[in-house]
Amino acid sequence: MKSTQFLIIGWQEVVVFPEWRQIKMKAKMDTGARSSAIHAEEYRVIHLPSTPLKPLNEVLEMKIKAGTSSKQKMLWVRAPIIDYRNVKNSGGKIEERPFIETTIGFGDYSYPIVLSVTNREKMKFPVLLGRAFLAGKFLVDPSSTRTFKSRLKKLEKS
């Protein structure tokens, strides 16, 4: 039997996006959702010339709320679009969304991630992390929240 080490995380965490000026956002782990998503207040697609290696050569500029408190600020960030896919939203309706690729950080750990971009303004968490991202890396402890903040406090007390 193969032994694998998983990082234990809570059902909600604060994540960092290193490629986007280290901004922090609240994220909810959702093992029932297949894909991951990020909220954008608005976005625009920038079409670049196609190449043989990059037939879909588009960049998404999106306006997001950076921060985890009431003092959030709006920032424009960019990421390459890797695909457009149909996704069933929380209301059960299918919508076509752009999918982007970036890097996401948990404490000292960082991982590449694919995110769909959508309007999540009615949701409590601007970032939703689905099982395609979580699988093989994390175990979600539904009784814990913000485990990386807790780990830092424990280290400071030692």
Image: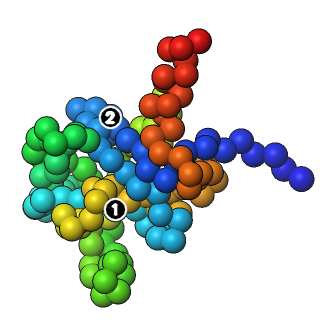
Numbered disc 1: secondary structure: strand
Rendered residue at 25%/50% (across/down)? 79
Rendered residue at 53%/28% (across/down)? 151
Going from N to C along the chain, the mark reached first, 2 or 1, is: 2
Please determine whether, in this image, residue 116 is positioned above or below residue 127: below
Q: Is residue 29 left or right of residue 142?
A: left
Please determine whether, in this image, residue 129 is positioned above or below residue 105: below
Where is residue 13? Give x, y as percent.
42, 45
Q: Is residue 144 left or right of residue 24?
A: right
Q: Is label 2 or label 1 in front?
A: 1
Please determine whether, in this image, residue 129 is positioned above or below residue 70: below
Q: Return the residue at label 1.
A: 37
Q: Return the residue at label 2.
A: 18
Rendered residue at 10%/45% (across/down)? 74
Residue 100 in view = no
Q: What's under tag 2, amino acid-wise?
A: Pro
Q: What's under tag 1, amino acid-wise?
A: Ala
The image quadrant where one finds the C terminus is: top right
Where is residue 26? Give x, y as percent.
33, 47
Q: Name the residue furthest bottom.
A: 93
- Categorize mark 2 by other alpha carbons within 10 Å: few (<14), some (14-19), many (20+): some
Please determine whether, in this image, residue 118 is positioned above or below residue 107: below
